[in-house]
């Protein structure tokens, strides 16, 4: 069976070694179970049965992973025979023992192959998962029926509903694997195990024949009810988790084959949902975002030592992110007390991880040995990359860059963490503008997944490639952004935040807006976000922009009125919401509503009521329209970069795929019609993006622009 990407190499090969048929899946990059692999596996099983000398079959995956799962690219296309579920049934029905020897990932359909085998072995580093739920699916090749039979209903539900990998040791404890090998070569370990099994006369052990013991049934039913009960809380608005629970319940109620039929019908239902399409889009978009022209043209520079200038919340968070990735960090501050504060910030982050049981104390101490500080820029002489994270002021940042220009070795990457300043201008202040780049981390920098890599005019390709390599090392999702005020994310945020202010001015309450946005799937609404981040931050930005504000645009000073009272949100105990006694969840505040009413009166805005749907249409149209502008102006390379930024930095619900994917699903003509409708009342704010107009005129979608030619 040949692989379409490498036509001369068969995706599955087999050869007999003594009594054991070694069946190897070799389908780069991750041995996904595409049609050629499925056909290859059937052919290998035929070969096993045709050869009387074969007494056992050993399944192996070549490369770093056993099998990453079904080929996600096939979803949404007409299914091609054989189905994976039939392949798994054939594996299970093989009259000779089938052994799976796993290294790296056995995920999704990969784990279903393992479950269908008769014996399972894991080498160190093997990991097992049923992550279909993260793609809006359920295990569709027998996983919902075999996993509960093998490891029990409760554990199987957890595996399927969390979608998270378990390591080899835990898999063995669960009963998911029979043998933990000590050696790392799956072929050698698998062969030894196969010989051992043959010597012991081990028989085939179809998982389908296992039954849930009668005395385990009440607990299993309880686990199912508990899972069902928690769906609303843990998987709100999602389709596939409920079907997972239904499919697992079938294990208790119907024979295996009937269970498989139910599983298949639930799988097809899931496959058909917009949620599945959105989650698969998110999966690929995250990976595509790293494919930028510069990284295609140049290799990253080496990164061994990191410098960070500034020990505030941001600098400390970035330091922790680097230390967590095993990169040594030198922190620079202007004087000893500031340095001590910066170091204390870093220590505090680690101490809280230890307190919450997320890290053990020895590991914290080990990471902190990589951390040092200085008030002398000379300590950065050997740094390969320095991130400046000082006060957002051009003069202050240029002064730092002058120092970096003086002390850093040739070829060091000089990065700024600015969130809106002009990096082109900053780069021009040094003698090596080709080394200057923006690395826009999001707070808390050690937690938030998004990293905007801001690419100034003169930056060298290999510096951009280094930014992406760093993101990968930090396990962050990187998005390339051009230089403009706010780059991709904050620029779009400014516009939809403004739409929220207009909704407020025209009659919607902040609480109603937040609720509508939460119901759409964001973890928080815009007013809650302000309270969490601190209202003073936005206030400072508004003051800075006051002089250049477009006089034709309405200005809603409600947030200013709160800030003037010192109501900055959670940290001051009140903002848009009340937080009595340090509460994390806010309460609605009648005084805020009174202030809002006063502001509305001053503005003379015509008051009306809004339904939740109307609120969302405006909020999202503003987001989508500015997203289109960002693509149109080349600030984002492709629509998918906007989606990734909003998914990983701004809480856009993943099951909706990002604002531009969502717009495609709704229909761009509908979005445009909304914008025209809103523009009738406020033409200065609601101006359709030229890209949106163009796409609608051409009958195209954002998705059509997602193919990027690497040059
Ligand atoms: C399933 O199995 C359904 C079944 O129950 C039922 C069926 C009936 N398919 O992540 P990486 C590509 S649902 C196609 O950067 P890593 C990926 O796009 C599936 N392509 O590598 C990238 O391509 P490119 C359940 C896939 O080393 C390249 O491989 N399984 C798939 O950081 C490298 O990927 C999952 O959800 C796939 N399944 O991580 C597992 N997987 O180079 C998804 C990867 O062109 N995969 N690609 O950009 C993973 O979690 C990670 O890829 C893995 C490796 C941990 C395996």
Image: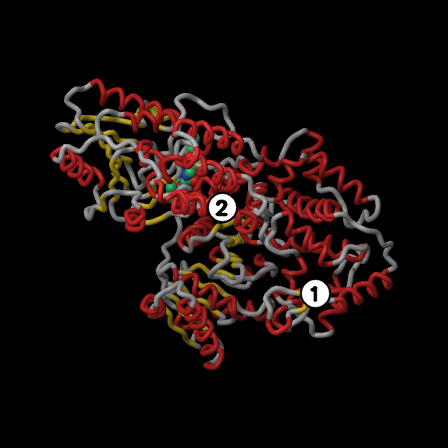
Depth check, front residue: 137 or 245:
245
Q: Residues within 10 Å of mark 2 (few under 14, many from 20)?
A: few
The coloring applied to the image is: secondary structure
Q: CA distance from mark 1 to mark 2?
A: 38 Å
* Residue that numbered label 2 is attached to: 225
Q: Residues within 10 Å of mark 1 (few under 14, many from 20)?
A: many
Disc 1, SS? loop
Q: Is residue 130 above or below residue 321?
A: above
In the displayed structure, does residue 107 sit left or right of residue 628?
left
Disc 2, SS? helix
**Ligand 1 image-quadrant field:** top left
Residue 104, image x and y in percent?
31, 43
Residue 257, image x and y in percent?
40, 27
Asked if residue 9 shows in the view, the reply is no
Tell which tag, 1 or 2, sits nearer the viewer: 2
Residue 456, image x and y in percent?
55, 53
> Which image quadrant for residue 103?
top left
- Give the mark, 1 or 2, whose residue is nearer the N terminus: 2
Q: Which mark is residue 341?
A: none
Query: Can you name the residue that lies furthest to the bottom here?
Result: 337
> Which image quadrant for residue 375?
bottom left
Q: Is residue 86 above or below residue 296?
A: above
Which quarter shows the N terminus? Answer: top left
* Residue that numbered label 1 is attached to: 576
Identify the residue at horizontal 76%, vertical 45% (top origin).
687
Depth check, front residue: 35 or 697:
35
Depth check, front residue: 116 or 340:
116
Residue 495, image x and y in percent?
69, 53
């Amino acid at each position: 069976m040949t692989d379409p990407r490498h036509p001369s190499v068969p995706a599955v090969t087999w050869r007999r070694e003594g009594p054991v048929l070694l069946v190897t899946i070799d389908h780069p990059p991750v041995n996904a179970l595409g049609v050629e692999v499925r056909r290859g596996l059937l052919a290998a099983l035929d070969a096993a049965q045709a050869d009387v000398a074969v007494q056992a079959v050993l399944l192996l995956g070549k490369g770093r992973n056993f099998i990453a799962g079904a080929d996600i690219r096939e979803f949404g296309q007409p299914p091609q025979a054989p189905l994976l579920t039939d392949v798994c049934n054939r594996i299970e029905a093989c009259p000779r023992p089938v052994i799976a020897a796993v290294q790296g990932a056995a995920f999704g359909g990969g784990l279903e192959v393992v479950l269908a085998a008769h014996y399972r072995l894991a080498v160190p580093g093997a990991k097992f998962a049923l992550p279909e739920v993260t793609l809006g699916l359920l295990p569709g090749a027998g996983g919902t029926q075999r996993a509960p039979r093998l490891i029990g209903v409760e554990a199987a539900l957890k595996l399927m509903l969390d979608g998270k990998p378990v390591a080899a040791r835990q898999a063995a404890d669960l009963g998911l694997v029979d043998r933990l090998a000590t050696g790392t070569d799956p072929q050698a370990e698998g062969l030894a195990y196969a010989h051992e099994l043959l010597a012991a006369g081990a028989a085939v052990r179809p998982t389908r024949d296992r039954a849930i013991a009668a005395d385990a049934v009440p607990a299993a039913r309880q686990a199912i009810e508990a899972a069902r009960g928690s769906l609303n809380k843990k998987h709100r608005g999602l389709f596939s988790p409920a079907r997972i629970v239904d499919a697992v319940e079938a294990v208790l109620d119907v024979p295996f084959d009937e269970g498989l039929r139910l599983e298949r019908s639930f799988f097809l239902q899931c496959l058909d949902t917009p949620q599945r399409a959105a989650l698969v889009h998110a999966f690929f978009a995250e990976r595509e975002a790293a494919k930028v022209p510069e990284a295609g043209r140049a290799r990253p520079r080496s990164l061994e030592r990191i410098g960070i200038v500034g020990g505030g919340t941001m600098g400390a968070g970035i330091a922790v992110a680097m230390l967590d990735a095993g990169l040594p960090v030198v922190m620079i501050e202007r004087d000893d007390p500031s340095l001590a504060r910066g170091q204390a910030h870093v220590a505090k982050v680690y101490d809280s991880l230890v307190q919450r049981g997320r890290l053990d104390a020895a590991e914290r101490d080990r990471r902190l040995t990589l951390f040092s500080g200085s008030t002398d820029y000379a300590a950065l002489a050997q740094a390969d990359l320095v991130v400046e994270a000082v006060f957002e002021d051009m003069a202050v940042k240029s002064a730092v860059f002058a120092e970096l220009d003086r002390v850093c070795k040739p070829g060091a990457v000089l990065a700024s963490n600015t969130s809106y300043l002009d990096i082109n201008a900053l780069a021009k202040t040094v003698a090596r503008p080709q080394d200057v780049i923006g690395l826009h981390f999001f707070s808390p920098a050690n937690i938030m997944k998004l990293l905007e890599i801001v690419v100034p005019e003169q930056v060298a390709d290999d510096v951009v490639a280094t930014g992406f390599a760093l993101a990968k090392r930090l396990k962050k999702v990187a998005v390339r952004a051009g230089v403009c005020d706010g780059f991709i994310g904050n620029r779009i945020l400014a516009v939809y935040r403004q739409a929220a202010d207009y909704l407020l001015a025209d009659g919607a309450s902040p609480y109603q807006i937040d609720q509508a946005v939460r119901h759409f799937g964001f973890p928080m609404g815009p007013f809650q976000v302000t309270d969490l981040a601190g209202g003073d931050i936005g206030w400072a930005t508004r003051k800075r922009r006051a002089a250049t504000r477009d006089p034709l645009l309405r200005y809603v000073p409600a947030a200013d009125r709160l800030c003037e009272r010192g109501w900055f949100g959670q940290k001051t105990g009140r903002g848009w919401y009340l937080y009595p006694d340090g509460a994390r969840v806010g309460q609605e505040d009648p005084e805020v509503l009174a202030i809002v009413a006063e502001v509305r009166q001053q503005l003379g805005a015509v008051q009306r009521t809004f339904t939740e749907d109307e609120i969302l249409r405006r909020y999202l149209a503003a987001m989508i329209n500015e997203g289109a502008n960002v693509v149109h102006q080349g600030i984002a390379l492709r629509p998918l970069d906007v989606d990734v930024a909003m998914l990983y930095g701004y809480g856009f619900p993943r099951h909706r795929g990002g604002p531009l994917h969502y717009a495609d699903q709704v229909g761009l003509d509908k979005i445009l019609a909304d914008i025209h409708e809103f523009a009738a009342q406020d033409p200065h704010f609601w101006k359709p993006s030229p890209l949106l107009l163009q796409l609608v005129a051409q009958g195209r979608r954002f998705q059509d622009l997602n193919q990027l030619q690497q040059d």
